[in-house]
Amino acid sequence: MEGIDFSKRENELIFIYTLPSYLEDNWVEFRLEEKMEVAFKKTFYFTEKDRIIGEGDFDEDLDSDVSINESNDKGIVSLDDPFSLDDSSFLLNESEENGSNEFLFGVKLDHYYKLNSDVLKTKNDFYFHESINFHVRHFVAETRISILAFIDRLINEDVYIGGDRYGAMPLEAYEKMIKDFPTTHDKKLYAQARVSSTIKNYFESTEDAEFKFNAYRNKKESVTGTDLIKTFKEYELEKYDTILEKLIKMLKSEESYSEDKWQDEILQIICLLYPKYIFTFKTVYLNIEGKSRRFLDFMLVDSEGNIDVIEIKKPFQNSIMNKGQYRNNYIPHKDLTGTIMQLEKYIFHLNRYGAAGEKNLTLRYRNDLPHGLEISITSPKGFVIMGRNDNLNKEQKSDFEIIKRKYKNVIDIITYDDLLRRLRFTIEQIKKI
C-alpha cells in the first residue's frame, strides 16, 4: 500500500515512502536519475544525497550478472551499476525489496529534530520536539499545501514546535492551526461566493452562494484566542471593589469635601466606569458671539475626538424630586431642573460653536491631545451626576424615571445610588466568570 511514514532511529528522523503494490518499477529511482530530485506531495523535495542506502548495497564479491530476482543470504540484491535505468539494474536494499524508499529528513539536537530546510525549501529552520509522533498531516494540508513553507513565507525566524522551550509553539496550537487550514470544499464555496457577488447584479437567477458560504463558515468552529475577561478578572474585581469602597466612603463624609475636590474625584470614577472617554478638561472657556466667557465646568473627550459635557453636584438628599405633589404628580426639584437647563444651554451653544469652535478647541488643547486627534462637536451629550434616589417612595421613583426618559436622547441623569448599583452589579457579574 502506498504511503508516507516517519521513523525515529537513534538521532535521525527518517522519511519513508512505500510504493503502491500495483507498480512494478520504482518511479522514485527514475526521478532521481532523470531530475536529480524527487518530490512528494509538493512538500518534500529529496535528492540522492538525502537517500539512505542499506548495508551490503555495494558488495563487490557478488557476481555482476545477478538478476533482480537473485539475492545473497542477507536478502540484499546488489549490482555493479547501481544507478542504471535498466529494469534489471535497480539499487535495492532490504527496504526496497518491500517497495520502500528512505530519506534522511531531520537530525536530533537537544531534544528537537531539526528538519532539513533544503528538503522543505524553507529559508528558516523548523524544529519539532522529540516526543511528537510524526504524521504526514503535520506537514501537508488537505489541499496539498506545504504547511511549513506557508508559515515560512510569513515569518523571519526559526520555529520550534512542542516541548517546553521558551517561545516554542505548543503542539496543541499547531495541530489546531492545521485543522483550521482551508479545505478544497472551503475554497470551492469561497470562489462561488466571490463570483456570485458579482453576477447577481446582472442575473436574477443567481444562487446566493455568499449566504451558503457564510452559513458554512458559521458552522465551523471559530478560532479562539486568549479569554481576556478571565485573564483580567482579578484585576477588574480589584478595580471595581476599590471604586465602590471609595464611593461609599465619600458618600458617608460628603460634608468634608469642597465642591471642587468632590467634582475632581467623582470625575475620576466616571472615567473609570465609562472608558470611552480618554480625556477630561475642566473650566473650558469658549468664545461665543465674540465674547470670551467661562462656559463648561467639565468637557469629556472620547478616542474619536467627540466631546460631551458633564455636571457634577454633591449628593444632597432632597435635590431630585419634590416631596409635595402637583395634580397627583411628583415634579422634579428645582436643583435638578436648574442643572438640566444649564446643560441644555451648554449643548445649545456648543452646537452653535461649529467648525470654528472645533478648530479653536483643538488648538487650545493640542498639547494635551494625542498627535492628529482633533476635537469634534457632533451632537454633544450631557451627563448630570447628582442626588440620591433610594430614599424616594414608589410613586416618586416612577415619576423620576419618566423625567429621566424625557431627556434621555440629550442628557443622562445619574444619581449616586445609580452609580453604587452599577458598581455592585458589575462586581457580581465578574465573580460569575
Image: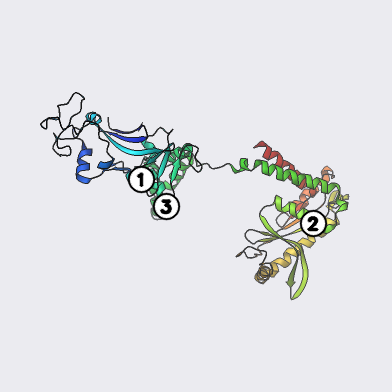
Q: Which residue is tagged 1?
A: 117
Q: Residues within 10 Å of mark 2 (few under 14, many from 20)?
A: many
Location of mark 3 (residue): 197
Helix, strand or loop status at disc 1:
helix
Q: Nearer the viewer, mark 2 or mark 1?
A: 1
Give the structural element (helix, strand or loop) at label 3: helix
Name the spot of residue 126 as percent of width and height, x first.
40, 43
Q: Position of residue 316 (x, y in %)?
A: 86, 52
What is the spatial separation of the Cα atoms under label 2 and label 1, in whole angstroms?
65 Å
Q: Marks 3 and 1, how far apart in space?
A: 41 Å
Q: Nearer the viewer, residue 61 or 40?
A: 61
Q: Amino acid at mark 1?
A: Ser
Q: Residue furthest right?
A: 324
Q: Position of residue 138 (x, y in %)?
A: 39, 38
Res. 430 visible in picture: yes
* Res. 326 in view: no
Residue occupying the point 19% across, 40% down = 30
The residue pinned by badge 2 equals: 263
Element carrying mark 2: helix
Frontmost residue, 279 versus 191: 279
Above or below, 373 relative to 38: below
How far separated are the C-alphas under marks 3 and 2?
A: 55 Å
Task: From the viewer's side, name the closer residue of 408 and 78.
Answer: 78
The quadrant holding residue 290 is bottom right
Q: Residues within 10 Å of mark 3 (few under 14, many from 20)?
A: some
**How was this image coloured?**
rainbow
Q: Residue furthest left?
A: 65
